[in-house]
Amino acid sequence: MARQRSAQPLPHVAVIYDRVSTKHQGGEDRHSLETQEANCRARALADGYPLVPEESVYTDKHTGEELHERPAMTRLRAAAKAHQFAALYVNSVDRLARDPIHLSMVLEEMAKAGVRVIFVTEPLTDTPEAAIIRYIQGYGAKLDNARRRESSMRGRHARVRAGKPLPGPRARFGFRWAEVRDSDGRRLRERLEHDPITGLVVARVWRIAQDLAPWTLRGIAATFTQEGVPTPTGKKREWDGGTIRDILTDPIYWGRPMGLQSVQESVDLNVRSQYVHRTRHTRRAVEEQIALPEEMAPAFVTPEAAALVAARLTQHQEGSGRSKNATHDPLDTLLRGGIARCGYCGYALYVARPGSGYVAYRCRRLAIRAHGCKAHSISTKLLDRKVWEKLKEILQSPTLIETEVAHLRKLRADGELPGAAVLSDLETRLTQMTRRIENKRRYAEFVDDEEEQRHMAEEVTLLLHQRRDLEAERLKTQAHYASWEREQEGLERTLDACARLAQHLDGFTRAEMRETLLTLKARVRVWRRDHQPDRADLTITLPISGVHALGAVSVGVNGHSDVNTLVLR
C-alpha cells in the first residue's frame, strides 16, 4: 500500500496583491491602490492573520489582460511555489486578472501550492459553481475592456465623420474653443478660434518660417526658450525643434483641419520589452485621415505659404542643416532603442544632437504628471563608456552567465524547456476541455426534453468559448517562451567572445558591445545629476534566473566626471 504523503505545512502568513492598469490611475476611486490594500488588510486581520508587512504587498501598475509581463505577479507566483505564504488577499476578481484563462491559471497554481485565495469584495467558495462564476466574471471583465475600447473608437469615428473635432484635454496650440453652447447651457467643443496669447506665438513661428533670412527648427526653438516663451503644454521650459516642426506641418494652421490623424497599434511581442505600454501611436496615411469642415478652425496662413515653408523644410532635411552634426551616426550609440530609460517616467531616452558636436540621451517625456519627471540629458559618449566599464566587471568573470548557460543546456538535455510546465498544463486543460465538449454533445443526442437540450447547448457554448481562450493563451505562451533558444545562443556567443578576448575586453567592436547589451537585456535607468544616491544604475535579465541588479553606474561626482561631454539640462 502506498504511503500517504502529507502536504508541506505553510507559514501562517498572508500576502496582498493589488493592481491598477496605468501609472496615473488612482485617487479616491474604489480601484485605487490605497483602497485595495486597506480592504485586504482589514479582511486579513479579521481572518486572524498578523499585520501584513509592506514587503508582502505585491503591487502591479500594468494591464490585467497580460500575465507574464506583470513583474509583481511573477514574483507572487514564484513565492507561492516556494510555499512562503498561506493566503492571498485580492480586492476583486478583475484585479487579479481580466483574462479568464489567466485567472484560472493563477488560481490553479495557488491551489496546487495550498494557498487560499480570498476576493474581499466578491467572496466565492471552492465549489464547481463558484469556479464557473469566476470564469464568467473573468470573461466578462475581458469583454468589458474590449467593448469599452470598441465603443470609444466607434464614437470617435462617428464624431469625426459628423464634421466635429475630437475634444482633447486642451485645444490645439494657438487656438481656443469658441464660446458655443447648447440649449441647456453646456459648452460645445465644436469650433475653434485664435487664442489671443498662444495665437501670437504660432503666428510668429509662421512669420519666421516665411522670412527669407536663414532659419532652422532648433534655432527657432532656442530663441523661444531664451525669451521664456511658454511651451504648448506649459509643463516644460524648453522648446525643441520637433514642436516647431509640428506647428509647421499640421494642416489645421492653413485652414484644412483633419481628424483621426493617428492610430493606436499593438506592440509586437518580440519588441515588447522596449516599450512601456503595449500599444503605440503612429501617424495615419493622409488618405486615411478625415477632412473636417474648414470653418471649424480659422487659418493662420494660406495654403500657398504653407507649401513654400514645406519646401524649405525638405531642403533643410536634405541639405546641410543636419550635416553639421552628421559626423556622429546615431546607430553608433550603444544604449539606443530602449536600453537607456528615464528613471522618473520609465520611457526610453532618445538620441538628441543639440549642436556643436554634442550628442546626448534625452528624456522625451517631460510631463509633470509622470512622477515629477523633469528635463534631463546625459552625454552618449560618457554614459556608453561608463555602462560598458560596469558590464566588463561581469564579462571579466562571467560566472553568472556560465551558470545560466549551464542551466539552459541541462534543461535542453533533460527535455525540460522553459515554460514547458505552463504549456503542458495548458495542453492538459485543452485535452480535458475537448473531452468534456464531446461528452456533452454525445449525451445531448439522447436528450428529448427541449429545456434540457437548451441547457446543454448553453453549456457547450460556454465550453467552446473556454477552449478558444485556452488555444489563444497557448499561442501567446508559446510566443513568450519561443525566444529562449535564441537567447541561449546569444549567451554562448558572449561567452565565446569573453574567452577569445580574455582580459582585453576593450577589443569588442561596437557591434559586439551592442549585441552583448541586447543579449543580456540590459536596462540603464538615468536620473538628473542631483538624484540620490546615484545618477544611473544597470540591470540585466537572464532567461531563467531573471533580473540581476549590477548596481550604480558611476559618472563621477555629481555627474561631472567629464566636463567636456556631460551637459545637464
Image (cartoon, rainbow, N blue to C red):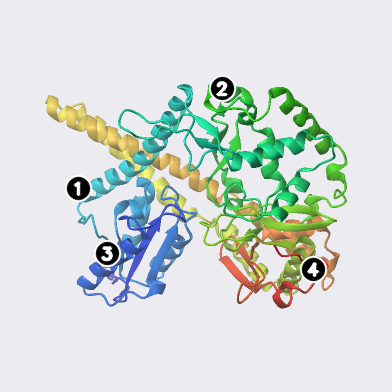
Q: Name the residue under label 3.
A: 39
Q: Mark 2 points at which residue?
A: 294
Instruction: Classify 10 Å Cα crowding around label 1: few (below 14), some (14-19), many (20 and above).
Output: few
- Mark 2 is on which residue type? Glu
Q: Name the residue under label 1.
A: 129
Disc with the residue nearer the chain's start (4 vs 2): 2
Whether residue 287 can be seen here: yes
Residue at 30% across, 53% down: 93
Mark 3 and mark 2: Cα distance apart in space: 53 Å
Q: Name the residue under label 4.
A: 499
Residue at 57% across, 65% down: 547
Q: Which of 313 and 200 is in front in this view?
A: 200
Mark 1 and mark 3: Cα distance apart in space: 25 Å
Residue at 44% across, 50% down: 63
Mark 1 and mark 4: Cα distance apart in space: 60 Å
Disc with the residue nearer the chain's start (1 vs 3): 3
